[in-house]
Amino acid sequence: MTGTETFTTALQNLATHKLRTALTMLGMIFGVGAVIAMLSRKRRSDSLVRLARVVGLESPTYVNKPT
């Protein structure tokens, strides 16, 4: 099977299974978006910790004492 035949077969399968194609694309979009959101959240957290250390403020530690 040549590259052209493979590509044509792939496009035919995508056209035949529209719902499956749409759900797969939606899952990939949400997955990539989730990874990007987590990475940006981590980067923001790291920058806030670095800023707190530069300013001399450490993140507050709370100790729960039983009463």
Image: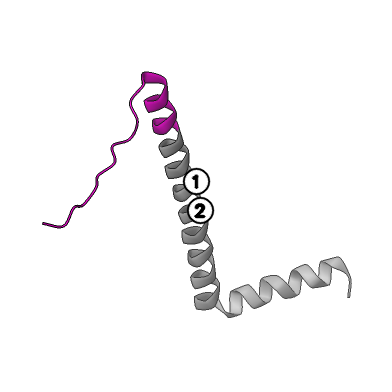
Q: Which residues are magenta?
A: 47-67
Query: Would you say 11 lies left or right of 20 here?
Result: right
* Residue 22 shown in magenta: no
Q: Is residue 17 left or right of residue 6?
A: left
Q: Mark 1 belongs to which amino acid?
A: Leu
Residue 40 image point, x, y percent:
46, 42
Q: Secondary structure at mark 2?
A: helix
> In the image, residue 37 lies at what x, y percent?
44, 48
Q: Which residue is mark 2?
A: 35
Name the residue rendered at 80%, 72% in the picture.
6
* Quadrant assignment for the C terminus: bottom left
Task: Examine the rendered structure and indicate whether residue 45 appears above or below residue 50.
Answer: below
Closer to the camera in the image, 10 or 46:
46
Q: Would you identify the image quadrant in which residue 24 lies? A: bottom right
In this rendering, the count of numbered labels is 2
Element class at badge 1: helix
Graded by Cα atoms within 10 Å as few (under 14), some (14 to 19) or many (20 or more), the crowding at tag 1 reads: few
Identify the residue position indicated by label 1 in the image: 39
Relative to 40, does residue 5 appear above or below in the rendering? Answer: below
Q: Measuring 42% from the left and 36% from the top, which residue is drawn there?
A: 44
Magenta span has 61? yes
| Cα–Cα span, label 1 and label 2 | 6 Å
| Relative side of 17 to 52, left or right | right
Please tell me which residue lies in front, 8 or 53.
53
20 or 63, which is in the foreground?
63
Question: Is 12 in front, or is 60?
Answer: 60
**Residue type at numbered disc 2:** Val
Q: Which corner quadrant holds the N terminus? A: bottom right
Q: Are marks 1 and 2 in contact (CB under 8 Å)?
A: yes
Crowding at label 2, few (<14), some or many (≥20) Cα neighbours within 10 Å? few
Point 50% across, 60% down: residue: 31
Q: Position of residue 41 (x, y in %)?
A: 42, 43
